Amino acid sequence: MKFNELTIAAAQSMMEAGELTSLDLTKACLNAIKHKNKDLNICLLVDEIGALKAAKEADERRRNGDRGELLGIPFLVKDNIMTKNLKTTAASMMLKDYIAPYDATVVARLKKAGAILLGKTNLDEFAHGASTEYSAFGVTKNPWDKKKVAGGSSGGSAAAVASDFCLFALGTDTGGSVRHPASFCGVVGLKPSYGACSRFGLISMTSSTDVPGCLTKNSEDAYLVLKHILGYDPKDSTSLNNKKQLSSKLAKQSLKNLKIGIPKEISGLSKKVDSSFKKFKEDLKKAGAKIVLLDMPSVDYALAAYYIITPCEISSNLARFDGLRFGSSVKASKLSGSYEATREANFGPEVKRRIILGTYCLSAGYYEAYYLRAQKLRTKVINDFKKSFDKCDFIITPTTPTEAFEIAKKKDPLKMYLEDIFLVPASLAGLPALSIPVSKKPLPIGLQIIGNFLDEQRLLSVASAFEELAVDRSAQPNL
């Protein structure tokens, strides 16, 4: 096994034993990027000089007696998360030359822990999409089949972990943008509870559901990363001072008599996803878990509510990109003309579509009819989850209704929005959720596990137990 193919836990064990250095590990990751990135279009920026310098510093810290779960571990960051003195473009021409003046809190915490920042990954422009086809810098290809999409919007981060470009990556999840590509690329994607991790330094999309998350090779690694990015941040007004602390190690949850809820409303699955989901349900029963069918009527309408709330918040959040303080400016004879020319030239089609939808829904005479009703439905979604968790310990669904689809196949925006159908309910409710692979042949298929609010500890414990049932670990991408 090559060094860059290791999990975080395995790499740390080897470094503790003196069998591996952070410099060796970082060079292995950089070498993989060098040889494969051009073909897959995963990384938008690689900071080789900075990464090698940080790796040498991590090795020096270890020689001086310092220890840490992420010390010397290379990672990549989705390019809508600020990284000091490096470009942060959000995969948009609007920010093509923007240099971040500071690190996002989650990045700063990882650096403090000794993790090695390698560079930035591709995404759908401003995180608007579910395939990483809407990037201004080209589509990211799926490592399992280069004719397929990697999912989105954190497609670059998921593909990076699947391709062993890094040992873990950061993404953002607004309505499924970590979990969706995790499913398509056969990795673990974790969305923490809303407010559990700081949003400071994220380029805002939908402020009421944006969450930084991680993509890893297994649930144990997700736990190690979460331990370092979790926690209150005074720079983020939505950050929670949660007194629940994660334990030092991840213990596997016993599946015997565990109550697993499945919404009755699940439908529209491809044959392979349906077959995989049914098989896993039977495996859970054999392991002693109890399946509980849930009645969650609001879930059928959650996607519609999400695609009202999200464009409304996007319309507001992207108003700052007008070519004056933020954004690449296009000159015109009048100030209003400059605004129009700048936004027309630098925003892609999906960004424009969402701005238009949001502005319409917030306009006079339509606010009550659309936005206010969507928020009321959001409350019903939250209440349905509360009632459901009175009956079960966890809720499972397929992560996506289909496996990865071909690049340029889904040209209808409405069909693309349906990719999020199982993902947005947990986002609207602010609940922790993750995707684990339950099958990897011929293409990965993901299982979504939803936990109770701020219960990441148990969520990752049960995910670790599920992984033992789920996947053929010998399957590898077709690189």
Image (cartoon, grey):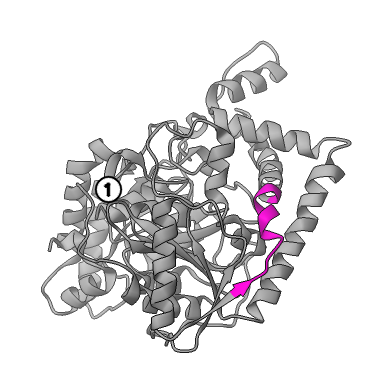
Residue at the image position 71 percent from the left and 50 percent from the top: 305
Q: Is residue 290 magenta?
A: no
Residue occupying the point 44% across, 72% down:
281
Relative side of 402 to 243, left or right: left
Tell me if 327 is positioned left or right of 273 in this view: right
Q: Is residue 460 visible?
A: yes
x then y, percent, for residue 459: 49, 76
Tell me: 176 left or right of 318: left
Stretch in magenta: 293-305
Q: Nearer the viewer, residue 44 or 82?
A: 44
Residue type at mark 1 is Trp
Q: Which residue is mark 1?
A: 144
Outermost residue, right side = 365
Name the residue furthest top. 333
Image quarter for residue 423?
Answer: bottom right
Classify residue 189 as left or right of residue 439: right
Q: Where residue 479 sits: x, y (%)?
A: 19, 46
Residue ID at (34%, 75%) = 469
Q: Which quarter shows the N terminus?
A: bottom left
Q: Is residue 395 above or below residue 364?
A: below
Quarter residue 218 falls in:
bottom left
Image point 84% across, 38% down: which residue?
Answer: 366
Query: Does residue 296 show up magenta in the picture?
Result: yes
- The image position of residue 79, as x and y in percent, is 43, 45
Pick whichever, 264 or 149, lies toward us. Answer: 264
Q: Is residue 453 visible?
A: no
Indicate the position of residue 149 as horizontal and vertical percent values.
38, 41
Mark 1: few/some/many CA within 10 Å (<14, 14-19, 20+): many
